[in-house]
Amino acid sequence: MMNFKEVKHSIPKVDGKGLLTGAHAYTNDLASDNALIIKLLRSPHAFAKIKSIGTKQASNVEGVECILTYKDVPRIPITRAGQGYPEPSPKDKFILDYYVRYIGDEVAIVAATNEKAASDAIKLIEVEYEVLKPVLDFEKAEGNETVIHPESEIYSMFPIGLDAKNNIACSYIDTMIVGDIEKTLKESDFVVSERYYTHAQQQTAMEPHTSSAFIDVQGRLNIFSSTQNPYHTRRIIGEALNKPLRDIRVYKPRIGGGFGAKQQIHNDLFSAIVTLKTGKPSKCFYTRKEVNESTFTRHQMRIDVQLGADKNGNLKAFDMQVLSNTGAYGEHSLTTFMVAGSKLLPMYNKAVALRFEGKVVYTNKCSAGAFRGYGAIQANFAVESAIDELAAKMNIDPVELRLKNCIKEGETSPVFRVMGEGGEGIAQIMDSCKLDHCIKRGKKLIKWKEKFPSTQVSSNKIRSVGAAIAMQGSGIPLLDMGSAVLKLNDDGFFNLLVGATDIGTGSDTVLSQIAAEAIGVPVDRIVITSSDTDTTPYDVGAYASSTTFVSGNAARKAGLNMRVKLIDEAARVLQAVHKDDIVFEDCTFKLKNTDQSITLKDLSEGLYYKYGADMKQLIASGSNTSPKSPPPFMAGFVEIEVDTETGKIDILDYVGVVDCGTPINPNLAKIQVEGGILQGIGMAMFEDVRYSESGQMLTNNLMKYKIPNRKDVKKLTVEFAESYDPAGPYGAKSVGEIGIDTPLAAVANAIYNATGVRIRKLPITPESVLIGINKLKS
Amino acid sequence: MQFNKPKDLNELLENLSISQKKNYFLAGGTDINVQIKKEFIKDGNFYYINEIDELNGIKRKNEKVHVGALTTYRELLESDTISEHFPFLQRSLTNFASPLLTTMATIGGNIANGSPTNDVTPPLLVLDAELELISVAGIRNVSLTSFFTGYKKSLLKKDEIIKGVVLSIQAENGYETLYKKVGARKTLTIAKVALAGLKKIKEGKIDEIKLAVGSLNEYPRRLDKLEEYLNNIMIRDINKNTIDEILSKEITPISDLRSDKEYRYRVCLNLILSFLGINH
């Protein structure tokens, strides 16, 4: 194993203490005290056309500075997705429109000198709606008489199968086909063919979406935003407001969690336009109700899975047909959908016939968007449930079935080449894949042999175990790019400037460790800044499990370049004949076989103040994109206790064994996995976005929308496989999403193992378990 | 809205007797602040009562324990008197709300708020708790079982306030006990079903049984008819169908965001059967 000095060490987060002790660090802390407060008038109808809108009375409220309706804003179709460019999501959103497409959609923007005036004015805006019949059931959206996007301006930047007249945001058919699926299924000894449903989920970041804007002394628009991707935000704001990008700066302070919710841009549009119209600073902070009702949820999906296997347990056929619900607007519609295929099909690479197809439809519900797991988690529930159903039919241990058929190190899958995110993919071989180890190790940790399938522990309590496996990605190959700049200062420390976006994940710490390792200095010599479109270099931002792998390699390259420059300077000062004669250790440059040396501190001071004509600023940069996206893998095992009296499920232990290559900071990596598992358990058993019959979201606060709390999960056991991916920085792959994928199927499988009840529709509630138990009884 | 801070109980009661508007009492504020924020309450006279000593404290007087209306859940959980005489009551409060809420919320406020899902009422009901209501006219005692009259309705008159809860120190002595709260998660949750029970069984016969439910009716209540059937019956003679029949008349579960009526009914039935030691 490699010997690392800085990476693979658990150091505390660089911002941890400050945040814990309440430092002013978030957008709302940093916004100007005299910023205008922005409030939105939102649609009370799931689908309606605005016939008239009157703002006169509202504008008379004292303190109101600005009221904007669709008549006052540019009518340029955009997507708020915050993805790479050209964007794979349909351009189907205006800042404001005369159509409102879900309850909570924006109708008017009000800015006032105080919150009360803005709220009072909102109530005085007079809107006459032509109420239209909404589409609330995503299975009835395609071809519905209601057309949610009748506007002529809607378009996509490249073919994605957009068919707005039929409420189809995108579709993907006849492309991801390998072998003859129908024939192979027919020839299979065992076939599972089932339909699974996954539900919408809220990202539930602690910090609500917040944006603040002001005009600086050069007349440029500055936006402070709780965004996961400042550069995409700048590009989209420029597009929506028809402004050159040189006139816009986007800065991201500390972020209180994103989980994908803040990949899409949202209230930045409103703060930007209010500040441009009034010339005054403004800020817009969402309430939890707005976050839940009017930002983005996870895509709801219906997934039909067909699996075929021979009698020896070899998986031969693997088919998925998916219908996904993107809600009112199509952010991430195509890409989440494709990830449902591209992160599941390759995992069982022994299958000879593969097919993946489907459509993503519009409905009059809250828009769906990016969310940790991003399609893979939905598909994981379906496929990993189906694998257990297949094992049950074959009467074999479901874990052994996985072990036999899963992808192994050195192998590949044709799927990598066929499917990318939004288009074709890139072939890749698994240079690191310890999935088989993860399965075997997890099995041991949960004591599968003793516990599978179940044990009756009392008259109404049954304990059981369940398993699922998962793969995710490490960024998007040749689409994601990150970069880093290192600058040497006197006193011998470095500024590390990165566009990568720490949203609470710890990436500032991880990237500092990587840069320190590359330069060869202790991590306390690194001072990191992230991220600001004016001062830090480009990075796609924090999404798609890209930061450690994509941005980490950029930090590494910058560090290695800086090291070369440092040694050049030291060689000059120490008059070395060859640069190879310089040894850099313990922040000191030594000339081999002599007693000559100079400290980094002295060298840095010389470069600033003493070297005359040789004085200079050392700056090194690195940027990185990769043709590979080495997948992290995980095996998840759960032990549950089912109460047959109430249908309640207790999670006794959740074991996750993860291959993320080298964990750059094992403690932070562990936290990522633990958080992912908990959020996955939340989706499996606690969280559910529910609507009334008229399309009003009912779960619009945290009283009604329950996420699991500390007492709900007794024990989490996370372990990392020894693994090293040569493409990653110091062998690292990414780890942000992989933790979330397995709990849905693992819990569903455990419930089956305990009770014989097979849950194919999420969430798993005590109600559905109890009904299932009673059905089996009668 | 008018905000008042009476200096003592007498001043409070005087104010109440002449108040023209609806009276609201601000103690822990855990319910009322939410209702104001959500604009469910838009007008009224508000009385800040946290500094009124007469409403505070847990005191034993002869065979009774008087729990002042301002007693917080934290105080109940930490009280030696409660742990000595009412361990069952104390146990039932352990997974109640968050540390922040238990530190602020008061027993009087919780009862007066009258929520059908109120966690503390079912155990108090089986303990035969009484309420002391006070006004300028004096004190009157009413049993908790008769206090609620409908959804968020009670016997409390406009000029009255709950002074305290009175418990007999023998209330749980010698009983086997049960408190079960079924919610969406282990803590910080609103009950889908709650059941409290006390029983004495001698030689296979139910000597005495008390059952109370929450979240299944317009207000938490005792299951009088079921108790009547079960008292003095041999366990082996209990007819499951009779329980089902009586229960179906005594509880009126509804379907809402938290659960559905079939589930609530079934779980209530299962919990009662389990408490009686009968397979379901």
Image (cartoon, rainbow, N blue to C red):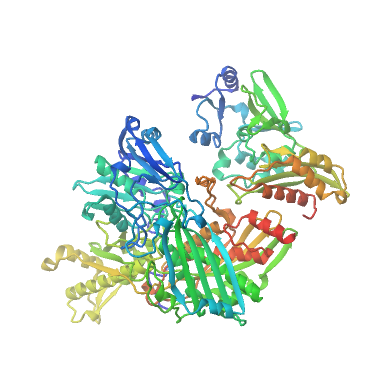
A580 relative position to A206: left or right: left
Residue A294 is situated, as x and y percent measured from the top left of the image, at 43, 48
Quarter where residue A542 is shown: bottom left
Quadrant placement of the C terminus of chain B: bottom right
Report which quarter residue A39 is drawn in: top left
Residue B216 location in percent, x, y?
68, 42
Above or below, A173 against B222 in this view is below
Classify residue B47 by image quadrant. Answer: top right
Q: Would residue B89 be visible to someone looking at this image?
A: yes
Residue pushed farthest front? A145
Q: Position of residue A607 (x, y in %)?
A: 18, 66
Asked whether residue A374 is in view, the answer is no
A656 vs B193, left or right, is left
Judging depth in this view, the residue of A513 and A611 nearest the camera is: A513
Q: Is residue A654 left or right of residue A506?
A: right
- What residue sits 77% from the left and 50% below the top? B273
Residue closest to the eye, A393 or A619: A393
- Who is closer to the viewer here, A524 or A683? A683
Q: How many numbered marks does the figure carry?
A: 0
The correct choice, above or below, for B32 with respect to A684 in the image is above
Where is residue A464 shown, x and y percent of the image?
Answer: 66, 65
| Residue drawn 44% across the image and 79% down it | A412
